[in-house]
Image (cartoon, rainbow, N blue to C red):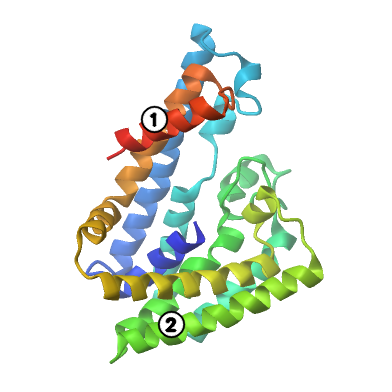
């Protein structure tokens, strides 16, 4: 998810549809698509499964139809991030100011998480921004940092005379940042469970940003070496359809949960189900 959000921000500098209006429209569409996906991949199959007696509430716990309907996943985050990018681009070009905003978002996120949850209407509206609800996986604060840094990196790459060299410099910064971030993690010893990953505290976000830069450089290096071969063409084809693949994948998984329940299969059936889902997705 951090790599995806970083690349989404970086792609703005290379897009032919990077006007404020185009970005804002795409952001709103992605937010709406995220909640529409919640209906068809989660709330609807869960509700039908429960009503038909195919699954019980205990079998899909801790999920409920309402939980699944209001989940904040990657698509709402992507949409809100694009809207913020559109707003920022009206004020200042991607650069140090954007990096400062990203740093501020990461630092402030733990302080504002869930502050409006006790106010029903405002809390519901702000849940995707800094909600502390258990079904908020990718809140705008702090995850906005990845597309903002990506937008700055993309701007540097788009204007570079030697993109390979610029990409190498970004990769070097990433390696140093990743090593420093791991050292900070070793010193501060934050919890390293999935909830901490979703909350993305500053020390973890710093290390992940370093990894993202290094990983992106490594991928760029391989692409330049491999050229336009079969495997690369397959990845490029998937990249152009990444949103569709994501939606189709989740629809198959969601309706599968509606049929058999959550975490109801042993390892071998899970591996078979994963193979089937990946095979059906393209």
Q: Position of residue 47 (x, y in %)?
A: 50, 18
In terms of depth relative to the viewer, which is nearer, 277 or 206? 277
Closer to the N terminus: mark 2 or mark 1? 2
Q: Is residue 39 visible?
A: no
Report the residue marked by disc 2.
Answer: 92
Of the 4 image quadrants, the one containing the C terminus is top left
Name the residue located 30 percent from the left edge and 33 percent from the top edge: 280
Neighbor class of circle 2 (other Cα within 10 Å; few <14, some 14-19, many 20+) is few
Q: Position of residue 251 (x, y in %)?
A: 39, 32
**Dividing the picture into quarters, in which one does residue 154 lie?**
bottom left
Q: Position of residue 162 (x, y in %)?
A: 30, 90
Name the residue located 60 percent from the left edge and 47 percent from the top edge: 127
In terms of depth relative to the viewer, which is nearer, 87 or 182? 182
Q: Position of residue 107 (x, y in %)?
A: 68, 70
**Closer mark to the observer between disc 2 and disc 1:** 1
Q: Which mark is residue 252?
A: 1
Residue found farthest to the bottom = 161
């Amino acid at each position: 998810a951090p790599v995806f959000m970083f690349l989404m921000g970086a792609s703005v500098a290379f897009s032919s549809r990077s006007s404020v209006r185009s970005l804002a429209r795409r952001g709103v569409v992605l937010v709406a698509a995220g909640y529409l996906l919640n209906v068809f991949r989660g709330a609807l199959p869960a509700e039908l499964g429960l009503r038909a007696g195919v699954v019980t509430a205990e079998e899909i716990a801790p999920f409920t139809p309402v939980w699944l309907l209001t989940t904040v996943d990657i698509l709402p985050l992507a949409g809100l991030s694009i809207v913020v990018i559109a707003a920022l681009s009206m004020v200042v070009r991607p650069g140090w100011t954007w990096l400062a905003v990203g740093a501020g978002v990461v630092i402030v996120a733990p302080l504002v998480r869930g502050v409006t949850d006790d106010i029903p209407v405002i809390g519901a509206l702000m849940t995707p921004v800094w909600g502390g609800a258990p079904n908020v996986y990718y809140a705008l604060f702090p995850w906005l940092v990845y597309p903002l840094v990506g937008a700055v990196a993309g701007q540097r790459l788009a204007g570079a005379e030697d993109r390979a060299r610029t990409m190498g410099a970004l990769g070097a910064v990433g390696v140093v940042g990743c090593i420093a971030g791991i050292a900070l993690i070793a010193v501060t010893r934050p919890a390293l469970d999935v909830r901490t990953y979703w909350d993305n505290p500053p020390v973890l976000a710093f290390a992940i940003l370093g990894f993202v830069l290094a990983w992106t450089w490594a991928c760029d290096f391989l692409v330049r070496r491999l050229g336009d071969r079969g495997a690369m063409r397959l990845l490029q084809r998937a990249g152009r359809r990444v949103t569709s693949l994501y939606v189709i994948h989740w629809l198959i998984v969601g309706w599968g949960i509606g049929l058999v329940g959550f975490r109801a299969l042993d390892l071998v059936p899970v591996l078979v189900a994963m193979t089937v889902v990946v095979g059906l997705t393209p």
